[in-house]
Image: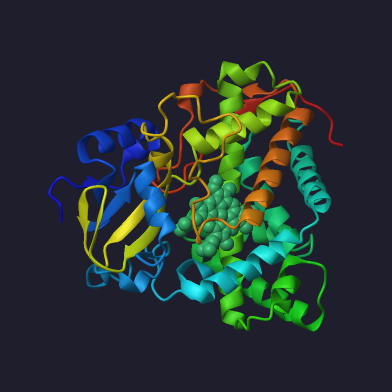
Amino acid sequence: MTPDAVPLGGPRFQTEPARLYREMRRDHGAVTPVVLDGDVPAWLVVGYRELHQVTGDPVLFSRDSDLWNQWDMIPDDWPLLPMIGRKQPSILYTVGERHRERAGMISDALEAIDPFELRGHAERFADELIDGLCTAGEADLIGQYAMLLPVRVLARLYGFSDEDGPGLVTALNDMIDGRERAIAGQTHLATSMAQLLADRKADPADDVVSRMLQDKSGFTDEEMMNDLMVMMAAGHQPTADWIGNSLRLMLTDSRFAASLFGGRNSVAEAMNEVLWEDTPSQNIAGRWASRDTQLGGRRIRAGDLLILGLQGANSDPQVRTDASALTGGNNAHFSFGHGEHRCPFPAQEVAEVVARTGIEVVLDRLPDIDLAVPADSLTRRPSPWLRGLTALPVRFTPVPAL
Ligand code: HEM
């Protein structure tokens, strides 16, 4: 292990990640040695150009976690195992031609979603959630709103009925929470997915799961189940955080405050700025070197783990010569990844519509909304991976439900 390796965890990822990534770059360069829980070594790629190299070469920097040279060090109860899994038959760890077929199946199934229907579902569920809180005059827009919305919309698009929705919301949030109800949540999700697959095999409909089943590439039920879990979990949490981080920006930054009363452009601007400066997807694990190589002046050994430092790369001064020049309409950030394993384009579009609709409905329905606590008291979850608020307390003039 490199003696000056930086722990990938701790309060600074929560409180001041921008300064932390700056210091990493200053002290270690574009490819920083880090240690994960249990003193497990890895590299964090925080240089824009270097991250481009890693994500653009899926053969040299593979998604195949079996290549890892640290598996002997990893105990069965290692806390990061759910994220850096071994032999998980999901799209995340599939490589080569099989991955291309699988990504194609998922992209095609998502691409066929009717945009008007998508917007309609997102508005309906968002309005339902606002109806549940609008008469109170105060609310937590994370726990009562952002964490409940994307999963409802995704469940409906994938093929679940509206009655299944609330149970799936609880199960997925329990699973993500990672505490005592996590396993029960995962079991409920898995059972519900298996049932949906069986139902749609017998009786196809116009939904994402039916379209995936029609795919000719011959994926097993287990593969389909795993992909559906990824599409649910990888879709829900970052989209919820995108809503939360964008609302926070709009409620705390005077550049946006003035346009809360109906300014549509500013919603898109706030959302894009969040993807550059305060992205939900801070760091993602990862890629494994398939042979010894060099990267950013470092010697990388075959089997080394490289973690994608998406936020670090987004703020790399080599590309951000003028702090504001790359925000606005520019979407050359890394927040959706890059290369063959990036977030599928139709998934990005679904996320964008759900997040934008979710934000617009809040602003339409609660026009005088304001923070209920000082901005500097807002806290983030203690995680170096996905960045999101623990709560967003707001107040507003009570209005009747629709
Ligand atoms: C409807 C919402 C979404 C769905 C259904 C979805 C689905 C997926 C899927 C299936 C993958 C795996 C692709 C592969 O391995 O080939 C993926 C990757 C990824 N997603 Fe998404 N996603 C959603 C929203 C988001 C959002 C909002 C963000 C961040 C702001 C995000 C960031 C990423 C990143 C960075 C990767 C690449 C991981 C890597 O390169 O290893 N996704 N997404």
Looking at the image, which residue sits at the far left? 3
Residue 334 image position (x, y, % from top left): 48, 45
- Lateral position of residue 322 relative to residue 230, left or right: left
Residue 74 position by quadrant = bottom left
Number of dots carrying numbers: 0
Whether residue 348 is visible here, answered yes or no, is yes
Q: Residue at x 21, y 48 (%)?
A: 297
The colour scheme used to paint the residues is: rainbow
Q: Quadrant of the N terminus?
A: bottom left
Residue closer to the observer: 333 or 53: 53
Whether residue 237 is visible here, answered yes or no, is no
Residue 199 image position (x, y, % from top left): 76, 78
Tell me if residue 390 comes above or below residue 94 in the rendering.
Answer: above
Q: Quadrant of ligand 1?
A: bottom right
Q: Quadrant of the C terminus?
A: top right
Residue 52 image position (x, y, % from top left): 41, 50
Residue 216 position by quadrant = bottom right
- Lateral position of residue 311 relative to residue 302, left or right: right
Residue closer to the observer: 264 or 29: 29
Residue 140 position by quadrant = top right
Residue closer to the observer: 74 or 100: 100
Q: Residue at x 43, y 56 (%)?
A: 56
Tell me if residue 201 comes above or below residue 234 in the rendering.
Answer: below
Q: Residue at x 58, y 29 (%)?
A: 328
Residue 208 image position (x, y, % from top left): 73, 66
Tell me if residue 64 comes above or below residue 1 in the rendering.
Answer: below
Residue closer to the observer: 364 or 112: 112
